[in-house]
Image (cartoon, coloured by chain):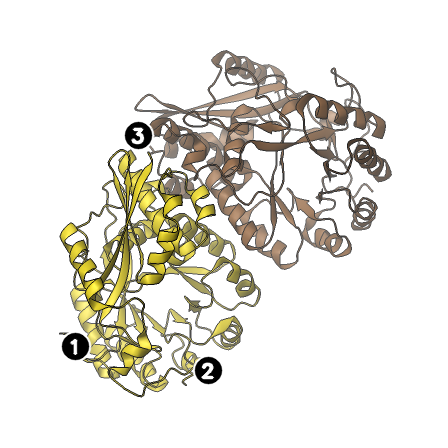
Chain colours: A brown, B yellow
């Protein structure tokens, strides 16, 4: 089996004006779809971040990918030095191997140890633009949370914080705790916009209410300082996102939980290695999500199913998207969970019409990289990013 | 594909009276051969330690293995808690997957990044019993080393030390350095029989001559104390042989190099995870070997070929065995290297006649576990194990 052609398609699709500490999501989210065609007529699917950066990075490795054997991932990894670029290729290669052997990707990664896969709702303060309406108060956030619980069955809720003044975010969490009772798992992620002092104050105020506090403040030193003062575990998707950041994080006890993302860490096999490393060093593991389509979600579901050391429900941004490039429409959650596909490979196929439509949208919208600050200024013209804000 | 039958065969084969700090090898080395038969007529091969312990451990998991799908290794790993038992099963499952897909095991592990695989000679002080004769002086050890270099082309030499008084072992290394010149890589492994003081003295005396000193003294605390006083890297196959021993070793800088052994660490995939962990924490990696047959050697060769972070030539005890259970006779070294097989699976097949003959020998010899002290007393009746000896 040899890869004869790498097809790379930039995609854009509508994204609501979701708030975070850096501003607000653009009207379109961007993704890149990779199709690897082989000499025996198979097509393997991969997906990564969108815009010109990832596109250029994929183009730069075209000669390495075309002609390669999809089984021989280690030599490819050595040639594709950027782990983010490699991850998209690796997932497509695993899809190919699965299709060639008749095995779902989870079997290629050692077989399921968990099924179905539980996810956490991803709650955002937001501006109005859709049937979710505006959510810029604790009371409105509670309504959003209730709808996520009602419509999808989530029993774990992640609130993207760092948007309202900290006391209002404390109030948002407290309203949810009161509404959903003691068994719901709650998380808060202010994206490192708080000072160490504010981080300690908010975390202490919510002690016992959060399964973890995600990235309250910037940098491993700051996180370590917070960790020394609180009992709530600290998680990160910001200060430990590369292998070389692990030793110092371990040494200074900067975090308790790593939010893994196979798109960052160099693919599914590397993510399993990260999970083992976390297990060995007593770190928890969860899985990160942002605006993505159903191919990435398939990869995440397979990965979660084969990772023994996965201690928390996975994040999922997915319910916020309106449509997908995969055949049969969007993935459907049942009781907050997704089913691991049994079909060969990832178990998802492309809807070529949707692919073409989102590719047209990419050209039409003119975006080539995400700019949350610029997007925020459409709503608040003089808005500026400052850190720490509180 | 389903495993229908696990066939476990205890084997014994002649082993010379090789000395180490614990005494002397028995007249027979013991190994266990695993054959996994599947419903589609394939047979997967594995090999592990010999004697009653590993046999009993394998029998204890028979019900878990029989009926299992060889692709689904993670659920098997969870049920077979002992990593040593799991490793034998995992290698046999990988052999099956390779045979089912037409792929060599190296491709199942991500494809070769290194070829051929370089090994280090394994030099032993020894009693007479064969055409290698007695080697109980530095001069005799030099003759043994010269023969290994001449017959196999090794350019890395590991001396099993802890046998002669330390100054004679220093002299052995110096004779080799003088004979083979500055490009040969030399290692010394006294199996933790020295005090911290002796370890520091010997390592300092050989500074610049050793690529690493292996396990000079007992325990991570002792090793860390030695490490603080010397420049030569310290390696271990004794004080870091399980995952739970890693964090303290990292924290106290007890070792610089881990000698991995897939039989200890839970198989080939786990060994790749160990390699990644070593890379992340700046530890070197080498591969350990003891008395084993050609199935284990095949597994080691495939593993070495797919492990990017492998910094040293692998150990090999293999030249000391006279015969093997694999078809076509023993593996052959060229310029100290072995070729990674291209055939599906491990690329070795059983010689059923040899298998039966070594199984008869297992019954005949009556050994059920290794006893180096007892064996030593056949040569030196009042010999006792003391630690530290020097």
Q: Secondary structure at mark 3?
A: loop
As drawn, which residue projects farthest toward the bottom?
Answer: B382
Mark 2 lies on residue: B195
Closer to the observer: label 1 or label 3?
A: 1
Q: Which residue is mark 1?
A: B129
**In the shown orientation, is residue A170 left or right of residue A374?**
right
Is A145 displayed left or right of B152 in the figure?
Answer: right
| Rendered location of residue B128, percent (x, y) | 18, 79
Whole-percent x and y of residue A379? 79, 23
Q: So how many labels did they put on this image?
A: 3
Letter of the chain that mark 1 sits on in the rendering: B
Marks 2 & 3 on one chain: no
Q: Between marks 2 and 3, how big is the CA–CA gap?
A: 56 Å
Residue A296's spot in the image, x, y percent?
53, 29
**For mark 3, does the 10 Å Cα neighbourhood hold few (<14), some (14 to 19), or many (20 or more) residues?**
some
Q: Is residue A325 above or below residue B12?
A: above
Q: Residue at x 28, y 63 (%)?
A: B316
Query: Where does label 3 land, which residue?
Result: A1
């Amino acid at each position: 089996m040899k890869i004869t052609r790498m097809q790379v398609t930039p995609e854009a699709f509508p994204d609501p004006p979701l708030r975070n500490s850096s501003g607000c999501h653009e009207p379109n989210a961007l993704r890149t779809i990779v199709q690897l065609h082989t000499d025996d007529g198979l097509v393997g699917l991969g997906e990564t971040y969108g815009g010109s950066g990832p596109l250029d990075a994929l183009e730069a490795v075209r000669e390495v990918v075309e002609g390669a054997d999809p089984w021989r991932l280690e030599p490819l990894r050595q040639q594709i030095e950027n782990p983010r670029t490699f991850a998209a290729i690796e997932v497509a290669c695993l899809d190919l191997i699965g299709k060639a052997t008749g095995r779902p990707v989870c079997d290629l990664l050692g077989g399921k140890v968990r099924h179905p896969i539980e996810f956490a709702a991803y709650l955002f303060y937001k501006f109005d633009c859709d049937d979710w309406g505006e959510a810029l108060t604790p009371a409105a956030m509670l309504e959003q949370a209730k709808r996520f619980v009602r419509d999808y069955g989530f029993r774990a809720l992640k609130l993207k914080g760092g948007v309202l003044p900290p006391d209002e975010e404390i109030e948002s969490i407290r309203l949810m705790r009161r509404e959903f009772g003691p068994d719901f798992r709650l998380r808060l992620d202010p994206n490192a916009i708080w000072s160490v002092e504010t981080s300690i104050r908010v975390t202490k105020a919510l002690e016992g209410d959060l399964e973890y506090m995600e990235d309250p403040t910037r940098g491993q030193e700051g996180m370590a300082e917070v960790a020394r003062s609180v009992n709530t575990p600290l998680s990160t998707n910001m200060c430990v996102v590369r292998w070389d950041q692990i030793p110092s994080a371990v040494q200074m006890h900067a975090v308790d939980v790593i939010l893994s993302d196979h798109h960052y860490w160099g693919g599914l096999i590397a993510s399993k290695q990260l999970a083992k490393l976390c297990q060995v060093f007593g770190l928890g593991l969860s899985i990160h999500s942002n605006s993505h389509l159903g191919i990435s979600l398939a990869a995440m579901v397979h990965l979660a199913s084969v990772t023994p050391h996965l201690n928390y429900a996975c994040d999922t941004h997915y319910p916020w998207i309106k449509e997908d490039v995969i055949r049969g429409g969007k993935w459907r959650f049942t009781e907050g969970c997704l089913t691991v596909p049994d079909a060969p490979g990832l178990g998802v196929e492309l809807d070529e019409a949707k692919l073409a439509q989102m590719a047209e949208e990419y050209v039409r919208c003119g975006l080539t990289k995400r700019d949350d600050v610029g997007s925020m200024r459409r709503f608040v013209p003089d808005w500026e990013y400052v850190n720490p804000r509180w």
